[in-house]
Image (cartoon, helix red, strand yellow):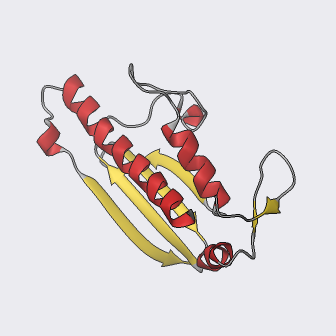
Amino acid sequence: MRRRQLGQAFTNIIKNAAEAIEQKAESSADFQVSDGEIALAIRNENQLVVIELTDNGIGLPIERDRIVEPYMTTRASGTGLGLAIVKKIIEEHFGEMKFSDAPDGGTRVTIRLSPSQLARLSHGTAEIPDRDGPASEDSEQ
């Protein structure tokens, strides 16, 4: 189940990047959806796996500090749950996620995960972090 959750998190991030490209194309006569780019880089850094997803879409909203809050959305049809779910999944996997401006416009999402913590989760020997209270024993959900 844990692998599926991480898959959902990455799917949500890629979906957001694609939607950001569509938004930029809708708001700019000089940019077409076919000009959109999504790049993924994965590297090891200080015993962590660092995953960076960069897009050249519309970029971060003014209220960038709130984008992972539940029900916060910049889209007319969005629920505002996608990034809140991603944040929760990454935290449950002892990771961290940060958003920044991409060098050439757009957004960069950086996720850091610990392979040793992920291995402990898959063997059921780690506790799931609970931001609202004490840690609880790991269980396959």
| Image coords of residue 131 (percent x, y) | 77, 48
Specify whether 140 is left or right of 62. Answer: right
Q: Can residue 89 be seen in this view?
A: yes
- 28 left or right of 66 in image: left
Tell me the quadrant of the picture where the C terminus can be found: bottom right
Q: Nearer the viewer, residue 88 or 28?
A: 88
Image quadrant where one finds the N terminus: bottom right
Q: Residue at horizontal 28%, vertical 30%?
A: 23
Count of number-bearing discs: 0
Describe residue 73's horizontal placement relative to residue 132 as left or right.
left
140 w.r.t. 73: above or below: below
The image shows residue 46 at horizontal and vertical percentages of 59, 79
Viewer-proximal residue, 122 or 69?
122
Q: Is residue 14 left or right of residue 115?
A: left
Front residue (pair 66, 88): 88
Viewer can see residue 103: no
Q: x%, y% of residue 114?
A: 61, 73
- Residue depicted at x 42% and y 48%: 13
* Residue at the far right in the pictured view: 134
129 over 56 or under it: above or below? below
Which quadrant would residue 7 be assigned to in this image? bottom left
Q: Which residue lies furthest to the top in this view?
A: 76
- Residue at left offset 49%, top offset 39%: 82
- The residue lying at 77 percent from left, 52 percent from top is 130
